[in-house]
Amino acid sequence: MNKNENRLRRAKSTRSHIRKLAVARLSVHRTGQHIYAQVFDASGTNVVAAASTVQKSVSEGLKGTKNLAAAAAVGKAVAERAMAAGIESVAFDRSGFRYHGRIKALAEAAREAGLKF
């Protein structure tokens, strides 16, 4: 198996566990240039809130889109949007990515903004 197949295998395992919990899910995707975050409802079909470094409202004032500060800005924005939609508690789906660097910065910023997971 290559690196991406391993990541997708880990993601599938995590998502099946979250599906059994039947709670809202904060899903994160990381690329070389950008980071994306979405909050899905408990059914897993509807996106309740989303934020990414592609959006001008999130990336303005940042030096770049592929650093810890950008990930923290996305985490804060997605948490605020989820709270506005009435979701306070979520399960964190890191999509098979390791919990360090930009993924960790996004999660910590979302927690500081009031999202519980």
Image: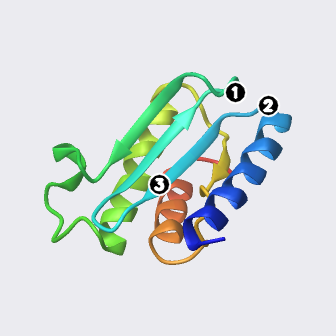
Residue 74, quarter of picture: bottom left
Disc number lying in front (2 or 3): 3
Report the side of 30 relative to 95 (left or right): left
Q: Tell me the distance, in whole angstroms, between the alpha carbons under discs 2 and 3.
A: 21 Å
Q: Which residue is mark 2?
A: 22
| Percent x, y of residue 28 | 51, 52
Q: Tell me the distance, in whole angstroms, between the alpha carbons under discs 1 and 3.
A: 19 Å
Badge 3 element = strand
Position of residue 111 relative to residue 103, above or below, is above
Q: Are marks 2 and 1 in contact (CB under 8 Å)?
A: yes
Q: Which residue is mark 3?
A: 29
Rendered residue at 79%/42% (across/down): 16
Residue that protrudes farthest toward the bottom in the picture: 101
Q: Which residue is mark 1?
A: 42
- Residue 114 seen anywhere in this rendered image of the structure: no
Nearest the viewer among 5 and 60 is 5
